[in-house]
Amino acid sequence: MSPNPEAANPAASVQASPASALGQAKRSAMQGPDGRAPALPRVNDVVDAVLVVSVRSFRDRIEHMQAEMARVGIEFEWVFDFDPDAITPEMLERTFAPSDLRIPHQSAVLKHIATWRICVERKYRRVLVFEDDVVLAPNFREVLVQAMAEVDLLRTPYLLYLGCGHNRYAPGARNSPTMLVAGGPLPAAEAIVFDQQSAAMRLAWLEQHKVTRPPDWLLREVDAQLGIPHYWLREPVVEQGSMNGKFASLLDEKRRGRGRLYAWLRFRWDRWRHRAVGGRIVPTDQK
């Protein structure tokens, strides 16, 4: 699988649907034609594919994701291409410019690029991508179904972030009338939904540029250049296991050095403090 496929760069609109239409989407997701609540759609009913980025040798994370996906009833596909031991110098030369990225970071970048290509080549309308340490909230399916009903009304390419942003929160998110909260720089890439148009635009960008950033920074900076809006959720429904202490971080040496107990305590303290007291908010496009 080549990390730099040929792809057209489609024109992008910058108009978004009004809040009233999003409110109707919420009601449609919650009610059937007769006004009764229908059976809740499955995750696989509202996205075309669920892709899990991992490495073949990460047995603990693979077992975790198998259990997590089974718990929520999600059918998924592994993205094992571009494991660190399979990356050739030619791949690195083709995709990356000189930088401080190490092979594990470059592997993660190539795997995320592979998800863009899967979306475009298979002509998926949108895909849900997980990294291999995610922990899904009990209401994950309900929130995702409502969010996808609102996304269906957007008239732009998009990226939707499902996580809690290392316990960063968009101002006003709690009181948002819609599940989608516009704007805010992407803090991580552990759980995202994106559409085919945004994937094609990124692949076209790669034909003209080389990479010096890890996946989250890459998405943040490239999408800003391309005018692809990012959305957060009013109710984040994913935590990152390497942040909440479930797993040791594989990419962040500072976090790994502090240990999982420190991560467990710090994550929970930050979650309470930032929700109850405030702080660490991210700017959004909404005034």
Image (cartoon, rainbow, N blue to C red):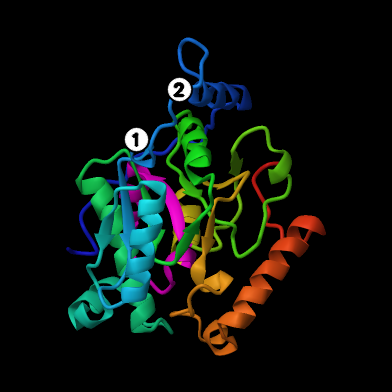
- The answer to whether residue 109 is visible is no
| Image position of 172 (left or right of 107) | right
Residue range in magenta is 189-217
Q: Amino acid at mark 1?
A: Asp
Magenta stretch: residue 171 in it?
no
Q: Position of residue 177 (x, y in %)?
A: 67, 32
Q: Secondary structure at mark 2?
A: loop
Q: Classify 265 as above or below 10.
A: below
Q: Position of residue 27 (x, y in %)?
A: 56, 22
Total marks drawn? 2
Q: Nearer the viewer, mark 1 or mark 2?
A: 2
> Which quarter of the picture shows residue 210?
bottom left
Q: Classify 190 as above or below 154.
A: below
Label annotation for residue 45: 1
Q: Position of residue 19 (x, y in %)?
A: 62, 27
Q: At 60% across and 43% down in the image, what residue appears? A: 182
Front residue of 277 and 12: 277
The residue identified by callout 2 is 38
Q: Secondary structure at mark 1?
A: helix
| Image position of 61 (left or right of 140) | left
The CA distance from mark 1 to mark 2 is 14 Å
Q: At 38% across and 66% down in the image, what residue appears? A: 64
Q: Amino acid at mark 2?
A: Pro
